[in-house]
């Protein structure tokens, strides 16, 4: 059994907990939290301990799965705990990956541990598919579409507008863009042509709805470059229709092997729950972190450095016999 | 530059040659053949040599890509040449993979070489996707659909019937089965429910068409378990409409991360040319064979043992910065 610790018990931590229950070779030792441990009851009944308990380096875990946010927590926590345990995170601020990798690599190398960063579906399974496709077919182009699904970052951005009580923002790929890419025509697409954004907003009583709608649609980075639709709904409808976190998307690669000979490769996900799927990916790569470290390998790794067989519970013989 | 030799100059060998031209770090040293070398003119102008020249072990190549048939050639050639060079093949007789792996492993280990077997799209990219999906989501099921595309084995089987001059057999997934699987309902599907088969046949003048059609539809293993349609056409139509070898298909995985929470993962290929795509996969994994051997690794490997970064021409830094 591979003993797992989870740091952070939000949506993602709960997703990892659910995934561990589906893997016979993984066991959950404890959930670690910055909150008062006694205030948390885990779904699986696993023990809850303070994050401070991790600092000794003596917790009886093989891999620590760090389920914190990318903005401020992971840049600090992942290098810190990579000096003490094998760790894995889902760091998803694409532009800062090289810096994060370097910090985790240094700490993990010194400690003889493995630190897998940026694991999930994007970065994660989508990255893997971009790299496989462009390696097999160098003369081509990768297109990534997200959705239809809830973007938590965009939902939070709308919630910060005065007069907004709650929001759920869906990212939606434009069907005509998807079709053009799937046809193999390698179109050039602007940000606006690829995705639209749809907001379901609960406003405070008496709020100026026209102002809120305008503030959303003109918000730089988040909405200004997109065609955005805003629907004002009441709290009951929010709860009834928008309480889950579905997501998904596609990596579509279109390339040429010789003059006029085209190939289209598509990897797509339809996920009922973004945090449960991300948690499932983290659990599988926690297995790889443990195995690589058992072989004496240390340092930072990403999903691109890890072979498919290393995340499977099955042996090489079983995989070759039944799944190759 | 990684120096590549190609053994066999049929459709697949030509596909590898086309792929090498698309990869700046790969160069084609020579094509090796059992035919008279002077009878072959390569598309790229590469030298053509006799297969006998390989036997010294002194040819100046880093990797030999063996483009022969799985029935009788690869079981003999891949272990033989793995004792002399890094090799790679597309062995696709699924049931015999463990035996083939063991023979190549023994020869390659003794010689300190790498032998990658069963590389292409199925086995190959489809296998990778089956293993990723079931590792991430163990509670689920993988469905593989092939087509619409030309099956060369089935086309050959029809050509062996008396009175048949030529045949092209298309394997076609049943749309209702695809839809049922994509919905996440995890249906149980029989062979007949998953695929139909469509044959375009040129008959000899005066041949008994009803007998030919009956022999096709009742042929054990190849057609008896499928709903098959037979179209008799003339040679001009065969040449005009059926001279290419398109193929493709999908691996669809449908699984559950917790009670009632479903996820559907689909990997699909639409290929203008089956041999050119398979050749492109072989070329990318030839790069991995060379690199692994340079690191001192030897023995038999499959696509499941090789990390995505190992088949990419880009460095780890470039991949993390731009593609993760």
Image (tube, coloured by chain):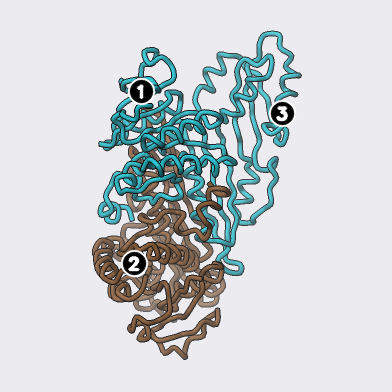
Chain colours: A brown, B cyan
Q: Secondary structure at mark 2?
A: strand
Q: Is residue A75 left or right of residue A9?
A: left
Q: Secondary structure at mark 3?
A: loop
Callout 2: chain = A
The answer to whether residue A182 is above or below residue A216 is above
Position of residue A143 measured from the top left corner of the image (x, y, whole percent): 38, 48
* Tag 1 and tag 3, C-beta contact below 8 Å: no
Classify 10 Å Cα crowding around label 3: few (below 14), some (14-19), many (20 and above): few
Q: Secondary structure at mark 1?
A: helix
Residue matched to label 2: A115
Are discs 1 and 3 located on one and the same chain? Answer: yes
| Snapshot quadrant of residue B52 | top left
Callout 3: chain = B
Position of residue A314 measured from the top left corner of the image (x, y, whole percent): 53, 58
Q: Is residue B295 left or right of residue A24?
A: left
* Front-most of residues B170 and B278: B278
* Tag 2 and tag 1, C-beta contact below 8 Å: no
Position of residue B130 measured from the top left corner of the image (x, y, whole percent): 53, 51
Residue matched to label 1: B53
Residue matched to label 3: B219
- Residue drawn 34% across and 66% down? A114
């Amino acid at each position: 059994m591979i003993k797992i610790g989870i740091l952070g018990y939000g949506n993602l931590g709960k997703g990892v907990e659910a995934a561990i229950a589906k893997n016979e070779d993984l066991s959950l030792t404890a959930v670690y939290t910055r909150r008062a441990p006694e205030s948390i009851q885990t779904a699986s009944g696993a023990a809850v301990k303070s994050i401070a308990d991790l600092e000794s380096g003596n917790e009886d875990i093989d891999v620590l799965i760090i389920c914190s946010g990318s903005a401020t927590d992971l840049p600090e926590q992942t290098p810190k705990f990579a000096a003490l345990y094998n760790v894995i995170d889902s760091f998803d601020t694409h532009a800062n990956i090289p810096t994060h990798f370097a910090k985790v690599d240094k700490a993990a190398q010194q400690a003889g541990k493995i630190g897998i960063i940026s694991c999930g579906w994007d970065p994660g399974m989508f990255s893997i598919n971009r790299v496989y496709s462009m390696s097999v077919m160098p003369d081509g182009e990768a297109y990534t579409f997200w959705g239809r699904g809830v973007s938590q970052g965009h939902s939070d951005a709308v919630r910060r507008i005065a007069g907004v009580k709650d929001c759920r923002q869906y990212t939606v790929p434009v069907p005509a863009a998807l079709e053009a890419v799937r046809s193999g025509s390698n179109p050039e697409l602007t940000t606006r042509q690829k995705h639209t954004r749809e907001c379901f907003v609960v406003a405070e009583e008496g709020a100026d709805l026209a102002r809120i709608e305008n503030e959303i649609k003109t918000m730089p980075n988040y909405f200004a470059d997109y065609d955005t639709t805003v629907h004002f709904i009441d709290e009951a409808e929010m709860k009834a229709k928008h309480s889950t976190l579905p997501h998904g998307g596609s990596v579509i690669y279109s390339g040429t092997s010789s003059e006029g000979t085209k190939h289209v490769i598509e990897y797509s996900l339809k996920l009922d729950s973004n945090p449960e799927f991300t948690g499932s990916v983290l659990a599988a790569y926690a297995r790889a972190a443990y195995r690589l470290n058992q072989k004496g390998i240390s340092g930072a790794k990403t999903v691109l450095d890890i072979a498919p067989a290393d995340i499977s519970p099955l042996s090489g013989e079983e995989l070759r016999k039944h799944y190759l």
